[in-house]
Image (cartoon, helix red, strand yellow):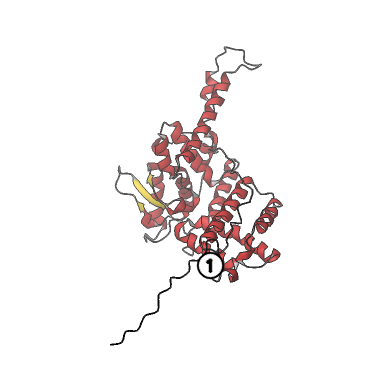
Amino acid sequence: MTFRASAPSIAPTPRPAGTLRRGAAHMKLSRAKDDFIAECRIRLAPQTCIGYESDLGLLVSLANVHAADSVLAFTAELVREYFLALSKKGLTMSTLHRRRATLNEFARWGIKRRLWTVNPMDDAPVIKKPKHLPRPFAKGEREALLGLELTDPKDRLLRALLYWTGLRVTPICGIRLGDIALGEPPTPGSIRTMGKGRKPHVVYVVPQLRAVLEDYILRFTNLEPAAYLLAQPSGRPWHRRMVARRTREWGRRAKVPSCTPHRFRHTLATALLEAGAHIRRIQEVLGHADLSSTMIYTQVTDAQVADTMMLLAPTPETPPGEDRSAKITGADSVPRPESAT
């Protein structure tokens, strides 16, 4: 029997660190952007992906102007051109911070896939996100908005959802009838939603919301579990602009400036804190992943306490020691929704 010597097996030579993957040099930057967005859609909220796509669209456009539609065009020079173009638009620091974060995520994604060997964002300027205090509605503003006569049942439902759940706009627009469980009183109902980062979040239905919700579902929906609670005639869900347009109109009619959807969330959170709710319970209500996001509401109430105490300071019209308790009692504050706690 003849034995034939087998050829010695040769282990593949490992690719040196810092080298491009095969074919990367010929890949379009627009294709890399699309692949990045496709992966983001699996794990991130739709609104986040929309923002990423918009931010990276400008990057691809500038690459076409200054170099070519190639992943190799994503360099530190292109990043400088990107922020130079943004600076001419007079954007806020918050927007610039978000755009930098988008490019940084995209750059790190490309590094892991060996589309470029050097992170183009390494030398990009650091843009700190400015801290803005929440702006809850004052007592008079809240009363004006809740007392506003709304003839459209969808408007009445939207107002109740914004105020009594503290949900962001995107989760509200994504509520389907199958996400709502009302149960039998006095058991509180619940609404399943999807928060930031596609994290499941449950909010409980207080009596004020339940009355509006039940009436709307029975009278104006087809009771199909897959149907959106706030649906367009086509069956598609409402979008952010539709919600913002309605709240802006409420503010105009109620004479409440800057009536944005997010201020309803600020109002509920601040009201719960002033009513004595534990900060961690408020964190759960709002669906914050980080307690520090919730703690910012304590700065609002601290500021209100300081303003109240300053009413004791003497003024030219009020001598020291004069009783000003009436003014203190009537000081503007955020109302406490009794059932929301």
Residue name at image x 62 percent, y 61 percent: 74
Q: Position of residue 249 (x, y in %)?
A: 58, 48
Residue at image position (52%, 65%) is: 35
Q: Position of residue 91 (x, y in %)?
A: 66, 49
- For residue 106, what is the image quadrant? bottom right
Using the rendered image of the protein, determine whether residue 146 is visible from the camera's viewpoint: no
In the image, residue 285 above or below residue 22? above
**Residue closer to the observer: 218 or 301:** 301
Residue type at mark 1: give it: Arg
Residue situated furthest right in the rendering: 88
Q: Which residue is mark 1?
A: 21
Image quadrant holding the N terminus, namely bottom left
Residue lying farthest bottom?
1
Q: Quadrant of the C terminus?
A: top left
**Considering the numbered disc 1 on the image, is that residue within a helix, a strand or a loop?**
loop
User: Does 159 sit left or right of 249 as displayed?
Assistant: left
Q: Quadrant of residue 121?
A: bottom right
Task: Reply above or below: 208 against 56.
Answer: above
**Residue 18's x, y, as percent?**
55, 61
How many badges with numbers are in the image? 1
Extreme-left residue of the structure: 1
Quarter assignment of residue 291:
top left
Q: Is residue 13 visible?
A: yes
The residue depicted at 45 percent of the width and 57 percent of the height is 43
Q: Is residue 304 above or below residue 99?
A: above
- Residue 297 x %, y %: 50, 36
Q: Furthest residue to the front? A: 2
Mark 1 is surrounded, within 10 Å at the Cα level, by few (under 14), some (14 to 19) or many (20 or more) other residues, namely: few
Q: Is residue 134 above or below residue 68?
A: above
